[in-house]
Amino acid sequence: MNLPELTLSRYNGQLGLFAILFVLNGIHDLIPLLENNVKYFQSIVPVRLLIFFILTGTSYLWESNFYIHNNSVFIYCFAEVWINFLLYNAVREEKNEEFKRLNQFVVNEEDIEEPQPFIVKTETTEIIEITNDDDDEDESDEDRDDEGDKE
């Protein structure tokens, strides 16, 4: 990658300052994690991911700035991008699981009725012949008249 090495003496005072900053940065998320503060992580992890991604790209591409363009800054920012990307995926997965759990429709198995096949009701109906007595008398009279004409 041709990034210049950051050379510091073992007895340089900046190493102690960097060590304290790294430790404080690591402890910074411990309190919200112990409090189970999900909103904090849902809001801060994407912002950190974006900031460290930009800083990683800047440390690699901006060759004229020796404060940023060195292997220590690049490696630290790249590790932060990687860790924050893993955290972002975990937070997003937890958010999706929480959404599924809250919007779940629970039905007891007792309440579910199996669909029954169509039942065809067959009823036997009797056909009743209705005869009108007046019509029968008129027909019988006509029949008698017809018979009488034949004779």
Image (spheres, rainbow, N blue to C red):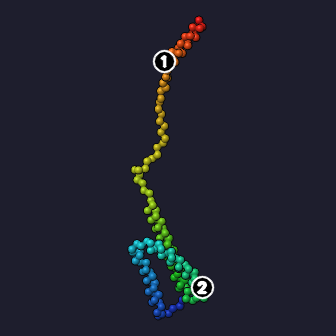
- Badge 1 crowding class, 10 Å Cα cut-off, few under 14, some 14 to 19, many 20 or more, is few
Residue 49 in percent (x, y) is at: 52, 76
Rendered residue at 52%/18% (across/down)? 135
**From the viewer's perspective, is residue 148 above or below residue 97?**
above
**From the viewer's perspective, is residue 49 above or below residue 64?**
above
Of pointers 2 and 1, the one earlier in the residue sequence? 2
Rendered residue at 39%/75% (across/down)? 34
For residue 53, the mark is none
Left or right: 143, with 99 as reference point = right
Q: Nearer the viewer, mark 2 or mark 1?
A: 1
Quadrant holding the C terminus:
top right
Q: CA distance from mark 2 to mark 1?
A: 117 Å
Q: Are marks 2 and 1 in contact (CB under 8 Å)?
A: no
Q: Residue farthest to the left?
A: 35
Residue 12 in percent (x, y) is at: 48, 93
- Badge 2 crowding class, 10 Å Cα cut-off, few under 14, some 14 to 19, many 20 or more, is few
Disc 2 marks a residue whose amino acid type is: Trp
In the image, 13 versus 35, the foreground residue is 35
| Residue that badge 1 annotates | 133
Can you see residue 27?
yes
Quadrant holding the N terminus:
bottom right
Rendered residue at 47%/67% (across/down)? 95
| Residue that badge 2 annotates | 62
In the image, 147 versus 18, the foreground residue is 147
Q: Residue farthest to the top?
A: 151
Disc 1 marks a residue whose amino acid type is: Asp
Local secondary structure at mark 1: helix
Local secondary structure at mark 2: loop
Can you see residue 5?
no
Residue 139 in percent (x, y) is at: 54, 15
Residue 124 in percent (x, y) is at: 47, 30
Rendered residue at 47%/76% (across/down)? 44
